[in-house]
Amino acid sequence: MSDIPAEAGWRERGRALLPKDVTAARGVTPAIILVEPQLGENIGTCARAMGNCGLGDLRLVRPRPDHLTERARAASSGADAVLEQARIYDSTEDAVADLVHVYATTARRRDMMKRLVTPRQAGAEMRLALAAQPLQPAGILFGRERTGLENDDVALASAVMEIPLNPWFCSLNLAQAVLLVGYEWFTGLDETPSERPPERQSPLATQEELSGLYQHLERELDASGFLRVPEKRPGMVRNIRSIFSRNGLSSQEVRTLHGIVRELRWGRRPDRPPRNSNGSNTPPDFHSGAGDAEPE
């Protein structure tokens, strides 16, 4: 991760962190275990959610439909590799047999002594487990669309995962649950800063360029009478300069602002000649020190 440039965005970082075929990451990412899924479309949308989050290990316990049907493939929106390499099991116990850490997702409290964790906490724990030596495989159990996991399924888990939602309406479909849990896993791997400076085609303006803009603008504001009250002038000038100085203007933006100020002044003159077709007609008495500039 340290080799990824700090200015890189989440797309660049994701490509560097994950193989294009997410199934190549099996064994170093959590397994997604769907217990008795009832609809092929749901299996497909879960595969799509897994692909979104770089998860490639799909395990199906007694699936009712064939997971490779046309509907399942269409719902996967290109995550065919996840479907094609899914593994089928006769029991939940078999599906989790090789795992060290198992999390059971459930919307209702069970009468069991189990640790209760959020997807974010579980994601952090699984990242540590999968980075450990030796590797500690982890997986997440998701239940049937209508009834969820049975108590026997939950009993196999080392912890219960509960997604914090509106307590009056916490219903999720299967793919939504997989996506939310997978997202917490994925974002923990990514070091993209929450905010990045915009990419600039023009360099930031120098203080000399900003000073020229301030002087030009203040000269025109004096001429228009805006700064006519001597006692208020210093404070107003400071406020105006503060507006522009805190916005990280580029050199091109400063030139554009010079052009705007020039046009506002020249446009008020009754003797202003008409513009030609390319818009050029510099006022003969305009001297801003910044050269001609048209608004972008």
Image (cartoon, rainbow, N blue to C red):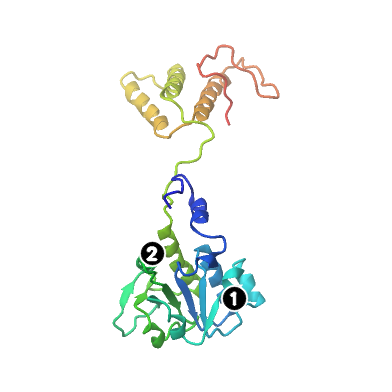
Q: Residue furthest right?
A: 277
SS assignment at label 2 = helix
Rounded to the nearest angstrom, the CA distance separating label 2 from label 1 is 33 Å
| Residue position marked by numbered label 1 in the rendering | 41
Q: Residue 140's image quarter? A: bottom left
The amino acid pointed to by label 1 is Glu
Q: Could you tell me residue 142's position as x and y percent?
A: 46, 77
Mark 2 vs 1, N-terminal side: 1
**Quarter placement of the C terminus:** top right
SS assignment at label 1 = helix
| Frontmost residue, 55 versus 144 | 55
Label 1 environment density (alpha carbons within 10 Å; few <14, some 14–19, many ≥20): many
| Residue position marked by numbered label 2 in the rendering | 131
In the rendered view, does 40 fall on the left or right side of 110?
A: right
Q: Residue at x 34, y 80 (%)?
A: 109
Q: Residue 154's image quarter? A: bottom left
| Frontmost residue, 51 versus 90 | 90
Label 2 environment density (alpha carbons within 10 Å; few <14, some 14–19, many ≥20): few
Placement of 126 over or under 7, stated as above or below: below
Q: Could you tell me residue 73's position as x and y percent?
A: 63, 72
Placement of 188 over or under 46, stated as above or below: above
Checking the image for residue 22, the label placed there is none
Placement of 118 over or under 290, stated as above or below: below
